[in-house]
Amino acid sequence: MNTFVRIFVLSAYVTLVLGSTAKELLTPEFIDGLSEKWWGPLGEENNASTCITPFTIKFSKMMITDLLHRINNRREVTPPLEGVAFQYGFNTDNLDYWMDFWANHYNFTEREAYLNKYPQFKTNIQGLDIHFIRVKPQVPKDVVVLPLLMLHGWPGSVREFYETIPLITEYNVDNGFAVEVVVPSLPGYGFSDGAVRPGLGEIEMAAVLRNLMHRLGFEKFYVQGGDFGALIANNMVTLYPEEILGYHTNFAVSLAPGVLISYLSGSINSLHQSLVVDPALAERMYPILRVALLLMEESGYLHVQATKPDTLGIAMSDSPMALFAWLMQGVSGASRRSYKSRVDGGLHDLYTPEALIDNVMFYWTENKFTTSARLYAETFNMRTFGTGLESIPTPVPTCTVHAKDEIIYMSPAMLKYKFQNLLCSVPLDDYGHFFALEAPEVFSKIVLNALIEFRAYHAKNKNCNHTEL
Ligand SMILES: *[C@@H]1O[C@H](CO)[C@@H](O)[C@H](O)[C@H]1NC(C)=O
Ligand SMILES: *[C@@H]1O[C@H](CO)[C@@H](O)[C@H](O)[C@H]1NC(C)=O
Ligand SMILES: *[C@@H]1O[C@H](CO)[C@@H](O)[C@H](O)[C@H]1NC(C)=O
């Protein structure tokens, strides 16, 4: 069964069976259990260091020599079918260009220095060494500094945020605040450890990353996320509504029962549809069949990674060419729908080749493909959906932005079932799934505007106590 269908069946189950009782799941035992779960090797639970250690990315000579050897000794690939662009996957006519670029033009020394341009650290959370960037703004002591956790997804990395970090942390007096960012590699990604036993999915990762913020001294903070970063953040605002001061997402999705029922109700007739979505944006959601077929066409990777990530990972960790093609197939497909019919996958249109290879290096350097792909297997299953967490609404003030070519569009009327304080929802006529990487200036401005909204919301509501509701 396609994973898309599985998600639908699972969410229907959540709606019917768990929907009404889910809130009772948010007991201190459940929440503390998530927080205390140990994902590292057994036997080290009582001896974990709480140190925060500076970290720099190293492209070792040995790693580079081995990588070049593999690239230069790659097998010849099967040519694409006549007249086919990216419809059958990565167009192999392009691979020689990219492998030549990686081996002969990607300057490892220079890129290593670039990737180390921000302060980076590691600290052990629940048995895993978590890698993160932390950039503080340069401001006088009396300026309010807002802590912002920024979360990437798959097939991305912290690299997606490199161009936005200086824009977001640059102090603008007019805003009345400055921003400090914490940008972690998700567990199992980049330079963060993966779990050694099953179970670390999107819910459990929410606990790990909240613990990271606590370790850094932030009891309350803002969060921004796209792709899997958004799914994880959805859980953070559900589990810790008192701690998350505001949530901004460029991948606004929810499988909460109300959201799905609202979506389905819009297909009854045009009157119902106009209650669900602004007619100007309706074609992003309807007809459901067209949207569903498009999702199925592009989500085969998701089903494989949600079921057999380890087998796929054997090829990906052995062949830089396979890894590059698999990750970039995803980047191409999620950037613009039209790129499927482009022989070059459109990869040069929006990103520099260096940025794309930088991102692949976050998977290659420490052989993290398999642990990254396991996040799908640990998330799209009954354990995760069965908690019913999705069906619990959150009072955390939320702002969303909707790039035109984002994979999924959900209207504000739908999202309000999950995000009860949806303060802003910005539809855009341009851009795609890797919004921060593609348009750092626009992205940063929208995130900063959301922070302004959140601050205004808190100023207005400072005398009302949400726990009394
Ligand atoms: C505890 O950690 C320290 C420092 O990492 C190490 O030297 C020591 O052997 C560990 N002890 C146990 C019982 O694992
Ligand atoms: C790579 O970059 C470094 C640092 O900028 C520079 O010294 C070196 O000459 C470059 N190598 C090549 C082959 O261009
Ligand atoms: C909010 O209300 C709850 C329950 O009445 C109370 O325990 C909590 O201390 C209150 N918080 C604040 C900030 O007033």
Image (cartoon, rainbow, N blue to C red):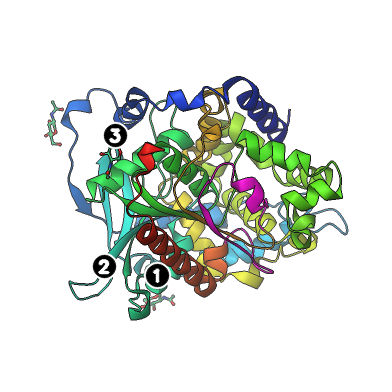
| Mark 2 or mark 1, whichever is nearer to me | 2
Looking at the picture, which amino acid does disc 3 mark? Gln
Read off the residue under disc 3.
Answer: 126
Looking at the picture, which amino acid does disc 2 mark? Val
Alpha carbon distance from label 2 to label 1: 14 Å
Whole-percent x and y of residue 23? 47, 27
Res 439 quadrant in image: bottom right
Which of these two is toward me, 286 or 356? 286
Read off the residue under disc 1.
Answer: 168
Task: First in sequence, mark 3 or 1: give its number.
Answer: 3
Q: Residues within 10 Å of mark 2 (few under 14, many from 20)?
A: few
Residue 366 appears in view: yes
Q: Residues within 10 Å of mark 3 (few under 14, many from 20)?
A: many
Mark 3: which secondary structure?
loop
Mark 2: which secondary structure?
loop
Whole-percent x and y of residue 242? 35, 43
Task: First in sequence, mark 3 or 2: give its number.
Answer: 3
Q: Residue at x 53, y 27 (%)?
A: 388
Q: Decide if residue 267 is on the left or right side of residue 159.
A: right
Whole-percent x and y of residue 466? 38, 43
| Mark 3 or mark 1, whichever is nearer to me | 1
Point out the residue furthest to the front here. 463
Res 266 quadrant in image: top right
Alpha carbon distance from label 3 to label 1: 30 Å
User: On screen, 137 above or below 400?
Assistant: below
Whole-percent x and y of residue 353? 56, 69
Read off the residue under disc 2.
Answer: 144
| Mark 3 or mark 2, whichever is nearer to me | 2
**Segment tinted magenta in the rendering:** 406-434
Looking at the picture, which amino acid does disc 1 mark? Ile
